[in-house]
Image: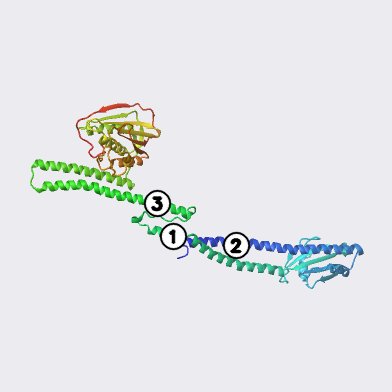
Amino acid sequence: MQFGKTIRWRLTFWYMLVLILSFLLFGFVVDHLARVSIYFQVDRQLLDTCAMITGALDRAYSEEGSPTAERLMDEISELGLPPQLALQLKAGGKTLLLNARSLPASVSDVGRGAGPRFGTPVTVQARDVPRPWRICLIRGGNGSSGYEVVLARDLTLVDGQLAAFRRTLLVVIPLIVLFAAGSGYFLAGRALRPFSRIALQARQIEAQALDQRLEIGNADDEFGQLTRVLNDLFARLERAFQQQRQFLADAAHELRTPAAILRSQADVALEHPRSAADYAATLEAMRSETERLSAMVDDLLLIARADAAQLPIVRAPADLMEIVDESCRALKPLLSGRGLTLHWNVGDELPIAGDVRLLRRAISNLLTNAIKFAPAGSGVISAAVSLDGDFGRVEIADNGRGIAEEDLPHIFERFYRGARCDGSESEGAGLGLAIVKMIAELHGGRVVARQNAGTGTILTLWIPAAPDRSGDENQPYSGNVSETDGEILRKSGLEP
C-alpha cells in the first residue's frame, strides 16, 4: 500500500507529525529549564561564596584598618572555598590567586567593573580563552587601601553537561518517535479492523441476499453506529427490491390478462369467416381491452416516473374547491345505469399551490373508487371540502358495503385489490389509490381511509393550503345529481 492512500497510513503520519512537534517543543522547554536551573545553582554558589568572602575581608579591615594582601588571603583561605571556584584578590598593590584553577588575566580584565558589591554574576568570554567563565566581582575596604575580589567559575563542565543533555534528547526523542510511530501504526490497524470486517461482510451481501445484516460489535462506538446505519440502508434496499420485484410481477400479471384477451379474440375472429356485425363486435371488445391496457400503461409510467424523481410538478395557484367541483360534475356520466346519487359540498375559494392536473386526477380516482364500491340503485356518494388548519381537506364517502378491515392498511399499495366486505374482489388494477397516495405525498399531503360509522368507506385527502389564503370561513352549497345515461372516464382518473 502506498503511503497516504489508506486511513491507517494517514493516521500514522499525522500522529507522527503531532508527536514530533510536541517533542520539539518539549525538548526546547526542557533544555531551557535545565540551563536556567544549572546556571541558577552556579550563581547561587558564587553569591553565597561572595557573601562569606566579604564578611571575612570586612572583619579584617575592621580589626587592622589597612591589612596586607597576605592577611586578607589568609582570611579567605580559612573559609575553605569550593575547589571549582577560582579567586583573584587585588589589595595593597598586589594581585594574588587562590585555588588550583588559574584565572586568565584577560577574563578578569573583561569582568572587572562589571557590577557593584554582591553584583549580579555575568558570563565572560575572552578572546584568547576558548571556554566561558561565570564571574562575580566584589569591591570593598577603605578607598585606595580597599580590595577587589574577582570570583569566577569555569563553565566548561556546566556547558558540557548541557551539551550531553541535548545529545541525549537528540538520541532519545527520535527513538521514542519511531517506537510511537510503529505503535501508532499497529494500534491504527487494530482500531480500523472493524472497517475491514464491515467491508468484507458488506461485500458478501448481494441483491439476492439483502435480508442479511452486518454483525454489530460494540453498539455504542462509532463502528456500531456505522453498522446500524448500513443495516438500515440494507433494510431500505431490501424493501425497495421487494417492492420492485412485486411491482414487476404484478405489472406483468395485470398486463398479461388484457393481452391474452386481445389474442384470444383475434384468434376467434380468424378461425373462420364471420359477418361484418361479428367483426365489429370483436373489434369493439378489443378496443375496450386496448383502452384498459393503455390506461394501465399510463398509470405504470406515471408511477415509474415518480419513483425516479422525474415527474414534473407544475406548482401554480389553484382553488381546491373549484377542482373538486369540476371533478364531481365531470363524473356524472359514470353514474349512468347504476342509480347512484352524488352529493358534493364545497364553499368559498380555498387557495392552494399545486399541480392542478395531478390534483384533479387524484380526486377523480377517489370519486371513481367510491363509485365502484357504492351499491347499485341505492348508492349515495358525498364529497366535501373544508379547511383543516394549514391543509385543505377533501373527504369522499360512500354508503357501500365497505372494505374489509384487514384490507384498509393496504389499499394504497400498488396492485392491491382487497376483497369487499361481501367477499367479492374489487375491480380494477389496484393502481388508482396508489396514485392518489403518490400525488398527495408529492404535494406534502397525505391520504387515509377509514370505515364509515354506519356503512361504507371514507377517504380523506389533505393538501397544503396556500399561505396567502384570503379567508378561512366556508359557505357550503349542495348539488344533487342522479343520471341514467352517458359514459366517461373509462380510464379511471384521466382528466375530463
Work out which quarter of the rendered image holds the C terminus and state it: top left
Q: Quadrant of residue 129?
A: bottom right
Asked if the residue under mark 2 is in contact with the one under mark 3, i.e. CB atoms within 8 Å, the reply is no
Inter-mark Cα distance, 3 to 1: 17 Å
Q: Which residue is mark 3?
A: 233
Image location (x, y in percent) of residue 155:
72, 68
> Residue 288: image x %, image y %?
18, 41
The colouring scheme, among rainbow, by chain, secondary structure or one colour, is rainbow
Give, as a three-letter code, the residue at label 1.
Arg
Left or right: 476 in relation to 131: left
The residue indicated by pointer 2 is: 23
Q: Which mark identifies residue 366? A: none
Badge 3 vs badge 1, beta-carbon distance below 8 Å: no
Kind of residue sitting beneath label 3: Leu
In this view, the residue in front, 398 or 480, is 398
Q: Secondary structure at mark 2?
A: helix
Circle 1 is placed at which residue position?
197
**Rounded to the nearest whole Å, what is the CA distance between mark 1 and mark 2?**
35 Å
Q: Quadrant of residue 368?
A: top left
Asked if the residues shown at circle 1 and circle 2 are in contact, with their CB atoms under 8 angstroms apart, the answer is no
Which badge, 3 or 1, comes first in the chain's sequence?
1
Task: Give the distance between the C-alpha atoms of the residues marked 3 and 2, in whole angstroms.
Answer: 45 Å
